[in-house]
Image (spheres, helix red, strand yellow):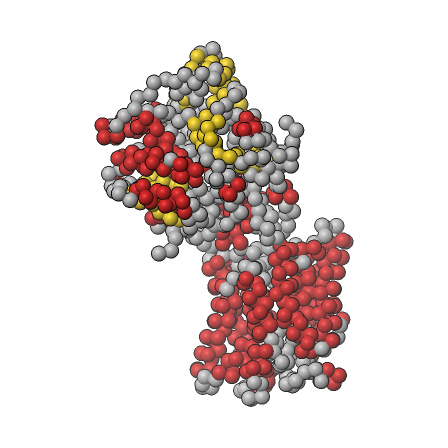
Amino acid sequence: MEQMLNVSSNPHVRDKMTTSRIMQLVVIALLPTTLFGIWNFGLHALLVVLVSVASSVIFEWLYDHFMHKPNTITDFSAVVTGLLLGLNMPPQIPLWMPVLGSAFAIIVVKQLFGGLGQNFMNPALAGRCFLMISFAGKMTNFSVGEKYSGVVDAVTGATPLAALKAQGFVENSVPVKNLFLGNIQGTIGETSALAILIGAVILLAFKVIDLKVPLTYIGSFTVFVILYMLFSGMGFDGNYLLSHLFGGGLMLGAWFMATDYVTTPITPKGQLVYGCILGIVTAVFRLFGGSAEGVSYAIIFCNLLVPIIERLTKPVAFGKGGKKA
Amino acid sequence: MGLLTFKGGVHPYDGKELSKNYPIEKYLPQGEMIYPLSQHIGAPAVPVVAKGDHVLVGQKIADAGGFVSAPIHSSVSGTVKKIEPHLNATGSMVNAIFIENDQKYEEVEYTPAKLESLSKEEILKRIQEGGVVGMGGAGFPTHVKLAPKDPSKIEYVLVNGAECEPYLTSDYRRMLEEPEKIVEGLRVMLTLFDNAQGYICIEDNKPDCIARLKELVKDIPRIEVKELMTKYPQGGERTLIYATTGREINSSMLPADVGCVVDNVDTVVAIYQAVILGMPVMSRIVTVTGDGIQQPKNFTVLCGTCMEELIGAAGGLKNTASKVISGGPMMGFAMYDLQVPCTKTTSAFLCLEKDPVSQAQQTACINCGRCVSVCPGHVLPARLATFAEHGNMEAFQKFDGMECCECGCCSYVCPAKRPLTQSIKSMRKMVLASRRKK
C-alpha cells in the first residue's frame, strides 16, 4: 500500500470552534462598549485600554518564556483579560495602574494557579479588586479632567450609583435615556447598557454564552432590589431600579464577566444557582455595603463558591435509578 | 407536534449527499474470502468445516459457541483453505475461516416458510439458525434479544432507521429500495410480541423514506412510522427509546426492561430473510464513501469480502486520502491495514482526505461546558476525562462515568480539542476489567 493511514480513537471529526476563536469572539463582542467608552471619555481611555491589553499579553509571554512553557498568547485569553481589566478602569487612571493590574491578574491569579482554565477567580476582576483595595482613591475617582469636558455631556463627578449611595435617593438629574445609552460616569466599559447588549447579542448568536447566568443574575438582583424598596419603606421607584441596573457595572459584569467559563460552574443547574447567588450578593454589597459598587466583589466572591455549587448540582445521569425488569 | 428527540447531541457535517443517490449495486468478490469467527457479541463461533472441505453458498461453516453467540455461513462456494487468526475491523486478531471462492456460487437449498404456519419457537429457531445479529454495529445475537423473560411485557418494537451517523447511507438506500422487506421483517417480530406496537423510526432528513414507508404501512395494524429530529446520536439505542416512548434506560439495563426491543433496519431485513425465505445472513449493505474515495457508492457486499477489494470497486482511494474508517465518523474504527474483511456489522468504509484529529492542537480545558450540554448521557465529560487521565477510578464511577455511551459528541464539540471520549472509553474498559477480576 502506498499511503500511510492515520489511526486515532473515535470520533474522527471535530467541530470548527476552538478556544482561540471563542476568545476572539469575546474580543469582538467587547468592541462596541470599548469604542463607546473611548468616544465617551476620550483619548486617555484609549490609552488605558491599549496599555492594559498590551501589558497583559506581555506578562503572559514573559511568564511562559521564563517558566519554559509553551507560548499561550495565541489563545487570545490574555487579550480578553487585558481588555476586561481596561474596561473596568476609571477613564483618568494613571497608566502605570493597568500595568500593575495586568501583572497581578496574569501572573498571580492566572499563571501561578496553573494558567488558562485553572484560575479560581476571574483574573481581570481580581486585578481590578487588587487595585481598588490598594489604591481606592484613584480607582473611584471618576471626574473627567478639564481638557475632555468638551467631549462629554451630562457628566458629573460621581457615578449614578455613587450619587445614589451618598444621597440615598435618586435625583432626576440622570435621565433614563442617558443611563441606557451610557453618557454617564463610570468605568470605561460599563456605562453603555446599549453597547454591552449589542455585544451580548453577538455572544449569544455565536453560542459563546447562553442566557442561564446573565438572566438569573440580573433577575435575582432585580427581585432583591424591588423587595428592598418595598420593605425599606421607600416604595417602588422605577428610577432607583434602573439606576441600579444600568448605572454601574452590572451589565458588563452579568454578560461578560459572570459568564467567564473558567470561573462558572460547568453544570447547567449550577449555572442557574450561581446566577441567583450572584444577584443576591451583588444587591447585598450595593445596598448594605460600604461602597457604591458591588459587582466585582460579588463575582470574585461567588467564583470561590463554584466548586461547591458544582458538587451540589451534579446532573442526574440519563436513566439513573431505572430498574432492571 | 414537535419532532421526537432527546436532550443533547450534535449536528456534524452529514456528508450523505456524496453517496445517497447511488442505488445499491451488487458486488461479487474476486479474491479470497475471510470469515472471522467473532462477528457478534458473545462467545466466538466454532468451525464445523476443516481445511480442504468444499462448501456451498449458505452452508453453515461455524456453529454458535453458546446461547449468546451466532453461527456463520459461507457466502460463496469454494474450498476451505485455512483457519487462522486475522485482523478484524475493530483492530483485534480473531480466528477466521479462509475460503477460496470458485466463482460458481452453488447454493444450498433454502427452506422458505409461511409466517402463519410458524410457531414463536420456530421463528426464534430460524432467526438463531440464520446467524442474525444486530447489524447496526453492536452485533448482539438477535434471537437472544427477541427472547426476553416475559415477551408479553414488550410494548414497542422499534425499527431503527435513524441512521444518525454522518456519511452513512446504507439504511437510507435499504428503506428506499426494499421497504417491503422491512415491513415484512417487522411483522415477523410483532408475531413474537402480542402486545407490542411496531414503530419504524426515521430521521426527518430522509423525507422520501418516511413517505414510502408511511404509504406502505398505512393499512397494516400495529405498525407506524415515527419521524425523528435529525441529530446525532438520535439512532443510539437509549436516545431512540427515549425519543419515541419517553422511557429511559441506563447502562446496566436492556431495552426489554422498559418494554422495548430495538433493531436496525438491516437486522429486520435479515430477520425477514431468515424466517420467511430460510436464508442465513450472508450479505449486507455497505456504504463506501468520503472525500478520499474516487466514486462513493452503496454496495450489497457478501460477508467475508476484503475491504481493499471493495474500496477498489469504488474507484480506489485518492492519493490524498489520509484516513480510512470502518463505520461512521463518530463511532467508527480507523484502519491501518485494508486487508480486513466485511462482517455482519460493517456498515461503511469512510475514506477521508483530511484528518482533523491529527491536525488538532490540544489546549487547556476552559470549562466551557459544551461537552456537558451535548452529552446525551447527562454526565460531565470534562470532569470524567480528567478523572480518567488521573487514573481516579473511584471518582470516575461516582460521577457516573459508566453511563457514557461513547457516542463521541463531547470530543466533537470540545474547543480545546481534548480527546474526551478516548479518555473516558479507556477508563471504562479499565473499570470493567477490574470488576471482572473481583
Residue B238: percent from left, percent from top: 40, 44
Q: Is B203 in front, or is A142?
A: B203
> The N terminus of chain B lies in which quarter of the figure?
bottom left
Left or right placement of residue A192 versus residue A106 in this view: left
Residue A213: percent from left, percent from top: 51, 65
Q: Residue furthest top?
A: B52
Residue B413 in the image: above or below residue B298: below
Residue B400 visible from this viewpoint = no
Residue A150: percent from left, percent from top: 71, 85
Residue occupying image coordinates x 50% and y 50% = B10
> The C terminus of chain B lies in which quarter of the figure?
top left
Left or right placement of residue A195 versus residue B211 in this view: right
Residue B163 in the image: above or below residue A77: above
Splitting the image into 4 quarters, where does residue B60 fall?
top left
Q: Is A144 in front, or is B400?
A: A144
Residue occupying image coordinates x 55% and y 66% = A201
Splitting the image into 4 quarters, where does residue A36 fall?
bottom right
Residue B35 in the image: above or below residue A161: above
Residue A164: percent from left, percent from top: 56, 84
